Image (tube, rainbow, N blue to C red):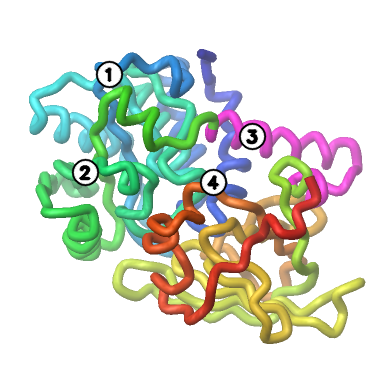
Amino acid sequence: MRTITADDLADLARGAAVLGTGGGGDPHVGRLLAEAALREHGPVTLVGVDEVPDDAVVLPVAMMGAPTVMVEKLPSVDQVGSAVRALARYLGRTPTHLACIEAGGVNSTIPFVAAAQLGLPLVDGDGMGRAFPELQMVLPTLAGVAATPMAIVDEKGNRGVLETVDNNWAERLARTATIDMGCSSIISLYAMSGVQLRGGWVAGTLSLCDRIGRTIREARAAHDDPVAAVAGVLGARVLHTGKVVDVARRTATGFARGEGTVEGLGEDVGHRVVLHFQNEHLIAERDGGIEATTPDLIIVLESDTGEPITTEGLRFGQRVSVLAAPCDPRWHTEGGLELVGPRYFGYDTEPVRAVREAVA
């Protein structure tokens, strides 16, 4: 158990953007919202997964939609708490803990807003160990936890609760509602007990985010290589270093989809990497051969500063390094690959594991 203040959020948000693999929303937006909430309501208590009582009522909360829209259409602080209150009212239960559904920029900090506002502890962990674009893509799905009842609210005051036959239908119906809500909404779902949490959660994610962000900051201050420092923390390998020469990005069916092309510099001159993304980076091709795939983490960092770059922030001319890091091993099971493997996203390839040449 530890206490998180507004001053702790800069490192945590930066590290969350690294684990977000390009998605999860703008870390700067989420950090500003969370800092404002913690300064108004006070610090948030972070508790370990193993500290949550068996009979706890844990309600995850997140932002849903296209990251390209989230940077322009900000949620209100009241909207975040409203989603939790709507689900608690529907369940007829009083929540005891809140949680992050994914490790991503805005979705690792939005739960701090709700925790500060509602005066509840936040679980140090998440449902993925990274970010994925669809609601059913969480480890609790593999553990048999239902996504619904699920509350969904927008900034105009519209709200609803979905009950669906399975977690895939939760994604379909919530995505449709989110599109009508302007391509972004706040959701609360996957209500679970402490027992269910321990069976399907990635423990320690928020502490890892804090460690990654602190590593980048300290490497820069010491004039060390921040990219190598991040690779060391995550056991990642650097696939490619170069300059962004093309980005094709579109918002379609509630997602940010597209491709980014990076021409090699330095030791990578003469080589080219193409990144394919749907909110998050899913495939990295180098000179036409697949180098890394979902469910492992494909991360883009600014080469000099180590600053993570989201898919909506990818721009022509940026000097970047592309890393591949191993995911939680549960994603490489048969059930995990059915949920988040390359074929689910339409790529006719077996997963290429980042861990094969890990440096740590």
| Secondary structure of residue under mark 2 | loop
Closer to the observer: label 3 or label 4? 4
- Which circle's residue, 1 or 2, is located before the other in the chain? 1
**Residue 289, position as x, y percentages in the image:** 68, 82
Q: Earlier in the sequence, mark 1 or mark 4?
A: 1
Residue named by callout 2: 146
The residue singled out by tag 4 in the image is 328
| Near-viewer residue (114 or 122) | 122
Residue 21 at x, y percent in the picture:
56, 56
Q: Which residue is mark 1?
A: 56
Residue 306 colored in magenta in the image:
no
Q: Which residues are magenta?
A: 205-230
Which residue matches tag 3? 11
Q: Are the residues at dot 2 and dot 3 in contact (C-beta closer than 8 Å)?
A: no
Callout 3 secondary element: helix
Considering only order in the chain, which callout, 1 or 3, is on the residue closer to the N terminus?
Answer: 3
Residue at 47 percent across and 39 percent down: it is 108
**Residue that appears at 18% across and 19% down:** 94
